[in-house]
Amino acid sequence: MSSEATDIAVVRENLKTSGDPRAERTRQGLFDAAARLCADNREVSVSAITRELGVSRSVFYTHFADVSDLALRMQEPLFEDIAATANIARTTDPHAAMLDSQRRLVGHFAQHRALYRAALRLPGVSATHRIQEAMEPPIAAHISEVGAPRGVRADIASRYIASAAAHLLAAWILDEIEADEETIANHLYALMPPWMHGPTNHRQR
């Protein structure tokens, strides 16, 4: 990596945690521009996003490394929100809560299909792996909340589940699998370990 690229990466990292309202507005504007492109089924690229927002490409790269980085940042709060909502809903019906969480997850990827397709087709670091990494923390937190069978480690289980979900979603987004949203959501639900739904007699003591 060149010194210039390193400098930009440092600036980008600092902006993520700066709390600067102007930076937050710009990031949200880029998110919204990408969402509009997806809603209109238009091409999603750095050029298209900046053109939609009316800013320069340098503005984009000040905040995101590439389209994949933008997609990852866009999905992080979603994963956390889905996990939080599922934790509340599972107190009344854990199975329905788990199915609803999978529907929301698939719905997000379907709504932003063009964005994720562009991200998944980028060379270099695998967007699928980055999606997996973003999924792991909320899944691990959920496992810690509901408990796991004796001998099952949360870190190993969360990596396994996140990897399976990320790869299935990536294959679907890239049209390697023909299925509608409900079918994908139902498979994610059906293939989820039952103990992930909520309290079970096999929890760790």
Image (cartoon, helix red, strand yellow):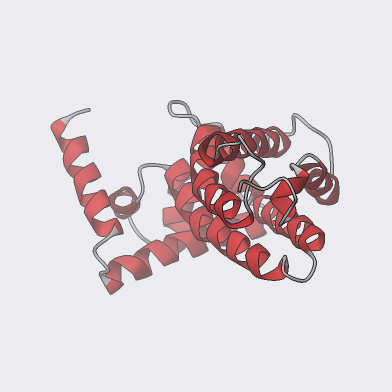
- State left or right for residue 151 relative to residue 56: right
- State left or right for residue 192 relative to residue 63: right
At which x and y percent is residue 157?
A: 60, 37
Q: Residue furthest left?
A: 3
At which x and y percent is residue 181?
A: 80, 49
Question: Residue 171, located in which quarter of the rendered image?
Answer: top right
Q: Residue at x 32, y 48 (%)?
A: 61
Q: Residue at x 64, y 64 (%)?
A: 87
- In the image shown, does 52 or 150 lie closer to the viewer? 150
In the image, is residue 112 above or below residue 121?
Answer: below
Q: Residue at x 48, y 38 (%)?
A: 130
- In the image shown, does 176 or 89 lie closer to the viewer? 89
- State left or right for residue 64 relative to residue 116: left
Evaluate whether residue 119 shows in this view: no
At which x and y percent is residue 120?
A: 56, 35
Evaluate whether residue 149 shows in this view: yes
**Exactly how many numbered labels are in the figure?**
0
At which x and y percent is residue 94?
A: 76, 61
Q: Residue at x 30, y 57 (%)?
A: 16
Q: Quadrant of the N terminus?
A: top left
In the image, is residue 4 above or below residue 85?
Answer: above
